[in-house]
Amino acid sequence: MRKKITVVGGGNVGASCAVNLAYKELGDVVLVDVVEGVPQGKALDMLQMGPVEGYDVRITGANDYAPTADSDVVVITAGLARKPGMSRDDLLLANHAVVTSVSEQIAKYSPNCIIVLVTNPLDAMCWSAFKASKFPKHRVIGMAGVLDSARFRTFIAQELDVSVENVTAVVMGGHGDTMVPVVRLSGVSGIPLTELIAPDKLAAIVDRTRNGGAEIVKYLKTGSAYYAPSASAVEMVESIVKDKKKVLPCAAYLEGEYGINGLFVGVPVKLGAKGVEQIYQIKLTEEEKGMLAKSAASVQELVDILKTK
């Protein structure tokens, strides 16, 4: 029996996500959006691309959640996108309302699904979905670290003029300016970055990674990144529906791991059919622990605001 995957939000990220899911034939896709006609039109367009590209899945669009019933995975991309000069945090309250409403509908129609969050500010929105859906913690996961690591890997590969396939990178912490690219655990075919890149250049790459989203927003002016974010979400969905058990950096709910409690923070996890099947606790240096604690504190600030609403 085919898997069923719902994507909530028919904008650039959601539509890109839906078409990537179709390309990989990971399951039948339902695209949901509040704007009448948008998800239906985009879904029909994607469906008609199937004979050309050679994928064979059902793709439907809807303005309500009834067609999403019994989904295996739901990807939430709905919400306002960042604009120039706007931080992820500025989006907090507006997108909290969106994610809360969406999560309640998801829990009603697909009570056994796994939720993959993409909406920003990511870590706080995971908390919103977790509270609204009342799902167990292993079934609510945030897409952040996969994207941040991809950006880090891209910049490393550019600097060294090597294949991105040979670059491994670990990025932890919140999805924002306080993220923690763990240089010590990143490298090229097993060679540590510190042996390949001068400290000043490495520091610049780390800084560019932290501001990777803002750099794209600055170029686009009226939108934010969507190709890489959607591809990152699809990698997570693939690991779940195929039970691949990939070890990926994702926003997971921590209960004491890394000394963090009651927050979604980016850490390495094993992603399989049950969702987060294991959280890996890496031994960090004191400096890395400090950066992760600072990142978690910034997430806590946002969650504290949400708790008062």
Image: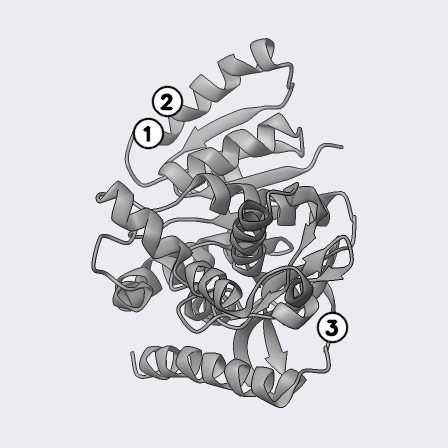
The mark that comes first in sequence, 1 or 3, is: 1
x%, y% of residue 132? Answer: 46, 67
Q: Amino acid at mark 2?
A: Gly
Gap between marks 2 and 3, in whole Å?
Answer: 42 Å
Closer to us: 99 or 285: 285
- Disc 2 target residue: 41
* Image quarter (top left, top right, bottom left or bottom right) of the C terminus: bottom left
Q: Amino acid at mark 3?
A: Tyr
Query: Helix, strand or loop at disc 1?
Result: helix
Do labels 2 and 3 touch, CB within 8 Å?
A: no
The mark that comes first in sequence, 2 or 3, is: 2
- Disc 1 target residue: 38
- Disc 3 target residue: 280
Q: Which mark is residue 14?
A: none
Q: Residues within 10 Å of mark 1 (few under 14, many from 20)?
A: some
x%, y% of residue 71? Answer: 60, 44
Q: Where 191 falls versus 217 (above or below)?
A: below
Query: Helix, strand or loop at disc 3?
Result: loop
Q: Nearer the viewer, mark 1 or mark 3?
A: 3
Do labels 1 and 3 touch, CB within 8 Å?
A: no
x%, y% of residue 236? Answer: 63, 50
Q: Residues within 10 Å of mark 2 (few under 14, many from 20)?
A: some
In terms of image quadrants, where is residue 168? Answer: bottom right
Q: Amino acid at mark 1?
A: Val
Gap between marks 1 and 3, in whole Å?
Answer: 40 Å
Closer to us: 42 or 282: 282
